[in-house]
Image: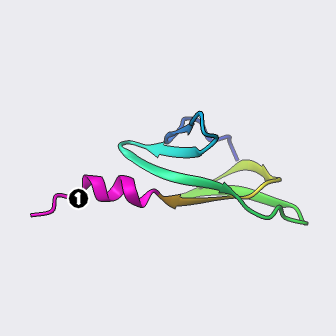
Amino acid sequence: MRGVSGHIGKIVVYKSGKVKFKIGDYLYDITAANNPNFLEELMVIEESSCYRVGSMDQHLIVTPDLENLLQKVDIV
């Protein structure tokens, strides 16, 4: 297996302490989740290859920023 390189977005930290994940023009809210009590590995599988990204020692919840999405909707 080989390592995965590159990135898909960026993390934005606001003065208020809010943290968001930005992919293209879309924002996602990031909040902390319960940490696991066991070893977890993050893997990426694409076509006939499998890549180990690394160990997970903290969980995050990433959800679409609905306000941001609704601003992009063209209401007639």
Tell me the magenta residue range. 65-76
Question: Does the magenta run of residues contain 66?
Answer: yes
Please give left or right for residue 58 compared with residue 69 in the image: right
Please give left or right for residue 50 compared with residue 37 in the image: left
Kindly identify the residue that appears in the image at 90 percent across and 66 percent down: 37
Furthest residue toward front? 16
Q: Quadrant of the C terminus?
A: bottom left
Q: Position of residue 55 (x, y in %)?
A: 80, 51
Label 1: how many Cα within 10 Å (few below 14, some 14–19, many 20+): few
Question: Does the magenta run of residues contain 19?
Answer: no
Q: Amino acid at mark 1?
A: Val
Furthest residue toward right? 37
Is label 1 in a helix, a strand or a loop? loop
Camera-nearest residue between 40 and 33:
33
Please give left or right for residue 64 compared with residue 15 in the image: left
Kindly identify the residue that appears in the image at 65 percent across and 56 percent down: 31
**Can see residue 47?**
no
Q: How is the image coloured?
A: rainbow
The residue tagged 1 is 73
Please give left or right for residue 62 compared with residue 26 in the image: right
Camera-nearest residue between 45 and 40:
40
Q: Position of residue 26 (x, y in %)?
A: 39, 48
Reply above or below: 56 against 6.
below
The number of callouts visible is 1
Camera-nearest residue between 55 and 76:
76
Snapshot quadrant of residue 14: top right
Snapshot quadrant of residue 61: bottom right
Reply above or below: 63 against 27.
below
**Can see residue 68?**
yes
Kindly identify the residue that appears in the image at 47 percent across and 43 percent down: 22
Q: Position of residue 27 (x, y in %)?
A: 44, 48
Camera-nearest residue between 27 and 49:
27
